[in-house]
Each structure stands twice: as structure tokens, then as C-alpha cells.
Amino acid sequence: MRVNKTGSRREFINRFGKPLEDYPSFTRATTGLSDATITNYLKRLHMFCLFVGEDPDTMIANRQADLKNDDVIIKERYEQHIKNYIAKLKKDNCVVSPAIGVICGFFKNNSSYLQIRLDNKVKYSKENKYDKYAAKRADVQKLLSITSNKRDIALITLAFHTGATPVDLASFKVGEYPLEPWKSFNKLRSKTLRKWFGVSTPDCCKAIKGYMLSRGIPEDAKLSKLHPEPLFMGHKGALDASAISEVIALLIEKAGLGSVPNFVAKSLRDGFYGVLKISEVDHVARECMMGHTGNVYHVYGDAEIANAEILKGMQKAYPLLQLSEGDVLQSSGSGLTESGLKFIAQLSPHMEKIVKFLENMDDVLYLSDPDLKEKLKQKGVI
């Protein structure tokens, strides 16, 4: 059934005496909205007002009075009106969602106190809707092993070494990521607009340099403030969040990891966070590196101290993040002696937990600390 919107507007004026847009409650609800959204409000609200038999101002006044009543039936009168209206729309084969969005928006935009809560459903965060999977280094190495595409290698490496989500990756510009290892940088997260602190790693620098070279971009390219160039590009232009998610999802399937429950693009971010926790990175530095907090300077005092703490945290975590081949210490399962493991554990408190983790994972320990490497050589461990 196709509804005659012109007829509903004429019927509204005949019944209530003036156009919908002349009511103050409609003006309040649509202030600041785009012309297209206002037009949508006009189309949808005419019919709901006629269905309920009340003009917009009367509905708002009645909603305010209903919420003060102790009787639940009266208090939820408009929730019931909307449910009945949904039933009518379905019976008439009309689209439901746009109309309900406009009606609920009308009440909420007049006052958040008046907003409609259908079925009193609690909105759960995405984290509570499904079990997370944190990508392991072996998973990431497997993803990298099945592709020779420089862009995809840079995407995967950057995500695992910074905790960037697809929307964050899409926001990176050429020249924004330092191409010299162990340099601090920060940017605003696209989703939350909170400052996100990062540290460039040798693996990331190598991957991004290789990708920029394949695009013909010089290594010393600077970030343009007037016309910043997106870092990650596809055949049709800059990759957005959905395109990046699709690229990573295809790599997961191609690597044979599609059967792993809940292994998605965001699992690379969760894997990064897991490594920071295993490495016992200071909790404030850890939250800053994840872009969870904006009060870093209240804790550390100034940017220099904050960046030093975050750099220290990344250097502690890097042995479990490093993806490229380099100087390695084999774990006990792969040949490292028990005395060698004990010596490493004594050098630094955080190394003990890393060694235990490696023993359990039968993995390898990558050396990124020159002083540690030299001490181990002197002891004959490597």
C-alpha cells in the first residue's frame, strides 16, 4: 500500500488547524537537522499524529505528564501507541524503521527525558554481545605469509603494532607515521576523538616504507596540512573503514583462519592490547597507547615524560610483537637452556613473565634491546 503523503498533510491541517511545521515542538525537534531529515520528519509525523489523534505540542505535554504518573500503564502510554502504530504499518505493508526512528527522535530531540524506550530494552555494548578473539603473533605472521601485497602487509603490521581499528587505519595520511624506529607520535582517534599515543617500530617502518615505494612516494614525504594524502589506497581511491575490514577479512579466510571464532579485523587491536598486558606495561601508558584516555598529562605531568613512558612500554612489549626475522633467542621448547632462561628473567622484572609466556607458547624471543643482547653474548647465552 502506498501512502498518500499529500493527503495526510491536508488531513492534518483540517483536523488540527495549522501545518505541522508551525508547532514549536516540531521546530525544537528539527533545529540543526539537514533539509532532507526535516522533510523526512514532515512525512512521517503527519501520519503518527493522525493515528494518535493529537497534535505535536499536545503529545509532548501529555508525555511530560505521563512520566510523572505512578501508574505504569499511563507512564508507558506512548510506547504502546508506537507499538500499535508498528502493527498498523506492518499490516499496510509499509516500511517500519524510518517511521519509528522519526517518532522516537521527535520525543528525544524535545528533551532526552521524554525519549521513548520500546520494551525497556537495555542497550548492551558491542563488547558484551560476543566473545572477543585476540590475534596471536603466529596468526599475524600467517596472514603476512600468504600475501605479497605491500599495502596489505603495511595494513596488518600497523594494526597489530598500534592497536588501530579499520576506521583508525583509514584516517592515516602520508607522512603521519614516523619512518624512523622508536619515534613517538600521536593523533586523534577517528571514532572517539581522544588522543592516541603510538611509537614507531622497526617492522612498521619497514612495511610502510615498502608500500610507499610501491606507490612511488619518497620516504621523506611530509604530512601536508592543507591537502593530506590518504596513506592506504585502492583501485577506486582511498580505502575507508569498510574496505579495510574487507581486505583483512579476505586475508583471514585465505590464511585458513576463518574457522577461528570471532577472528575479525578488530582482533589485531585486541591482540596488541593483550601483549601490552602480558608485558606488564604501565596501565596509564597502556591506556594511552590504546587511545582510551585523554588525561595522560594529569598523570605524567607533560608530554616529554608521557612519551618517555610510552616508549618504554613499547620497548617492553616489542619482543612479543616483532614479526620480521632477526636476532632471536630460542625458548626452552626450541633449545634455550634453563640457565639462559633464568638469566634473562633476572635482568628485568618484566622479562620473567615474557619468558614464562614463551615457554608455554613454544615460541621465540626477539631481541630489540642492544644492552640486553650484549649482556647475553657476554654470558654465552647467544
Image: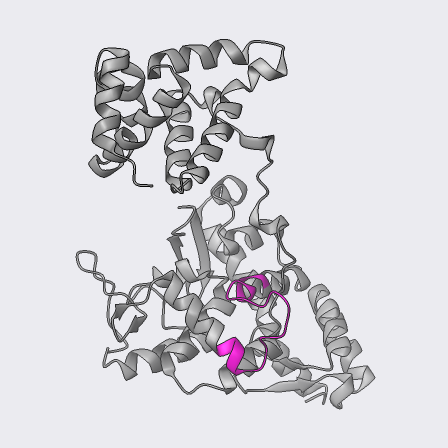
**Left or right position of 320 against 250:** right
Residue 143 in percent (x, y) is at 52, 80
* Span of residues in magenta: 251-270
In the image shown, does 34 or 88 lie closer to the viewer?
88
Q: Compared to 51, does 17 lie above or below?
A: above
Q: Picture coordinates of residue 99 (x, y %)?
A: 38, 35
Q: How is the image coloured?
A: one colour
Q: Residue at 23% of width from left, 33% of height from top?
A: 39
Work out whether residue 201 can be spotted.
no
Q: Nearer the viewer, residue 107 or 271?
A: 107
Q: Nearer the viewer, residue 259 or 161?
A: 259
Give the left or right position of residue 110, taking residue 376 as reference: left
Q: Quadrant of the C terminus?
A: bottom right
Residue 330, compared with residue 230, is above or below; it is below
User: For this rendering, which residue is in front, 117 or 172?
Assistant: 117
Residue at the location (79% across, 87% down)? 337
Residue furthest out toward the left: 226
Q: Residue at x 48, y 72 (%)?
A: 249
Q: Quarter-wise, where is residue 299 in the image?
A: top right
Report whether residue 4 is seen: yes
Which residue is depicted at the point 42% across and 26% down? 108
Q: Is residue 255 magenta?
A: yes
Q: Is residue 201 magenta?
A: no
Image position, residue 163 (x, y; %): 50, 62
Extreme residue toward the right, this view: 338
- Dominant SS of magenta comes to loop
Which quadrant of the structure image shows residue 357? bottom right
